[in-house]
Structures are given as structure tokens and as C-alpha cells.
Image (cartoon, grey):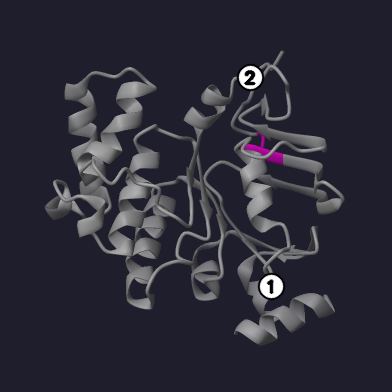
């Protein structure tokens, strides 16, 4: 049975020797890293390198084959894990916004706290209005998703995740589907969260953002962490030939 005995001097997320296969294809080949409370971690790498699979494993959306992932002391791979309890602690924002089209922006934010946390409509409404201000969309709270730009929808999706009061936020290529002009408004929202001390793990192609915001960058290729380090070291003094080649293509 999972025992939640986490204390703040321990990593808030601990990934240890994680392997994950889909059939014959081994996607993660012994991934290990720790994330401390309040850190911003960026995971970068070519398509198909296992980045998205990795963060989906942290949220128990994909089961791992072996190894250990702990979030606030909860063993994610424990068969007795209450996944709902885990997902209260770990918010996730996807490339696709997955908003309910027949609900307004504010209603989308309010749904999970009312249905899952059983909070009162009055309390949830007040919190949702605060969150929609946080993502700078107070003038759009009564708009439906179809009336919002991609960047606005993604900011509603971020507010919706925050409504569950998570301890950790996972972002999976959240700007990949956006027009260039709307990318910045989403990145500013994430930057604000990080400044407030939210622990963030991002899979991203936004190198300027990673350089500016990350405490630590992990470069993955073919299911392994090839190289990692703080941004200054990583971008200015990459050692592995695969890292150098990747950076030369995108910078």
C-alpha cells in the first residue's frame, strides 16, 4: 500500500531507472532524475525520444514496466495507488486543450473542483474568477472555447488544472499547436506560475523559454537522457555530440 511520507527536503518528483515499452518498442530505457519543490525542469529532444511518454508516466497516464516514480512520496507504480489522489497533486496540460465546447471558459475551470473535490459552487466560482484573472482572461470568462483563440484556450486549460490546487504542473508541448503570436501569452502564464514557486516539468521546443526559465534542462534521445545541466552550461558548453547536433539544428 502506498505510504505518503514526503518531506520538503526530499525531491517532490523522483524518477528512478524507469523503463517503458509499447509492445516490442522500448521508449524509455532507464530514465532517472529528481525535481525539487519549486524547480522548473525542461525536457527537450527530437520527436520520438520519449519526452511525452515520460511525463505521462509521472501522472500515471502510462504505466511503466520497471523502475520507480515517486510524487510527494506516492509510488506511482503501486498497483494500489489511488490515481485520483495522485492527479489532485499533479496537474497536466496537454498540447490539445480538451475543453468542453458547450461550457464557458469559467464553467470549464469550475467543473473539476465541483465534481471531483466536491467543493461548493460558491467557493469554486470565486476561485475560478481568481484563476481566470491570473491567466489574464477575465474579459473572456463567459466565452465558449469556439470563441477563443488557441492561446486563450490553452490558458483556460492551465487555469482549469490550477483549480485542483496541484503541487506539481506538467506541460506537454503546450505551445506546439499554437500560432507564433499566441505562443508568448501562454509562456508568460507559465512564467508567472514559476515565479510564484510552482514546481513545473515542461516538455518543450521553446529553447529561448527553456534558457530563460529552467533551473535544469534534460536532453533525451532514443529513450535515454543524453545530457543535462543548468541552462548556461547546457546551451553554451554541451559535451555530447548528439546534444551539439540537436542544438545546432534548432538554435
Image x and y of residue 62, in percent? 67, 40
Label 1 with label 2: CB-CB less than 8 Å? no
Count of marks overlaid on the render = 2
Residue position for label 1 = 233
Quadrant the N terminus occupies: top right
**Looking at the magenta stretch, what is its main secondary structure?**
loop
- The label shown at residue 4 is 2
Could you classify mark 2 by the number of other residues whose Cα lies within 10 Å: few (under 14), some (14-19), or many (20 or more)?
few
Quadrant the C terminus occupies: bottom right
Vertical side of 47 occupied by 197: above or below: above
Image x and y of residue 51, in percent? 67, 57
Q: Which residue is at a point 75% across and 81% down the rendered structure image?
A: 244
**Side of 127 where 54 appears, left or right:** right
What whole-number distance in Å separates the C-alpha atoms at marks 1 and 2?
A: 35 Å
Secondary-structure class at tag 1 = helix
Image x and y of residue 109, in percent? 29, 38
Q: Is residue 13 magenta?
A: yes
Vertical side of 159 occupied by 43: above or below: below
Quarter occupied by residue 183: bottom left
Q: Is residue 39 magenta?
A: no
Q: Which residue is at a point 40% across and 32% down the rendered structure image?
A: 165
**Side of 250 where 171 appears, left or right:** left
Ranked by sequence position, the earlier of labels 1 and 2 is 2
Judge whether residue 5 can be spotted in this image.
yes
Magenta stretch bounds: 10-14
149 or 200: nearer the eye? 149
Q: Which residue is at a point 33% across and 63% down the rendered structure image?
A: 150
Amino acid at each position: 500500500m502506498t505510504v505518503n511520507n514526503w518531506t520538503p527536503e526530499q525531491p517532490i518528483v523522483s524518477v528512478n531507472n524507469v523503463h517503458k515499452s509499447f509492445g516490442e518498442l522500448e521508449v524509455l530505457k532507464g530514465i532517472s532524475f529528481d525535481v525539487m519543490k519549486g524547480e522548473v525542469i525542461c525536457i527537450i529532444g527530437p520527436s520520438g525520444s520519449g519526452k511525452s511518454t515520460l511525463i505521462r508516466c509521472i501522472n500515471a497516464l502510462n504505466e511503466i514496466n520497471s523502475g520507480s516514480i515517486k510524487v510527494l512520496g506516492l509510488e506511482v507504480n503501486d498497483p494500489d495507488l489511488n490515481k485520483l489522489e495522485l492527479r489532485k497533486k499533479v496537474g497536466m496540460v496537454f498540447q490539445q486543450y480538451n475543453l468542453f465546447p458547450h461550457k464557458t471558459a469559467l464553467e470549464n475551470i469550475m467543473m473539476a473542483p465541483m465534481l471531483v473535490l466536491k467543493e461548493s459552487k460558491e467557493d469554486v466560482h470565486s476561485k475560478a474568477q481568481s484563476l481566470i484573472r491570473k491567466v489574464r482572461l477575465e474579459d473572456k470568462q463567459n466565452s465558449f472555447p469556439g470563441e477563443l483563440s488557441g492561446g486563450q484556450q490553452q490558458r483556460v486549460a492551465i487555469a482549469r488544472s490550477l483549480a485542483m490546487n496541484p503541487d506539481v504542473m506538467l506541460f506537454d508541448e503546450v505551445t506546439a499547436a499554437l500560432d507564433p503570436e499566441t505562443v508568448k501569452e501562454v509562456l508568460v502564464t507559465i512564467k508567472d506560475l514559476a515565479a510564484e514557486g510552482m514546481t513545473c516539468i515542461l516538455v518543450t521546443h521553446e529553447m529561448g523559454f527553456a534558457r530563460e526559465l529552467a533551473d535544469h534542462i534534460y536532453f533525451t534521445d532514443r529513450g535515454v537522457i543524453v545530457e543535462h545541466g543548468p541552462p548556461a552550461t547546457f546551451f553554451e558548453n554541451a559535451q555530447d555530440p548528439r546534444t551539439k547536433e540537436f542544438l545546432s539544428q534548432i538554435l
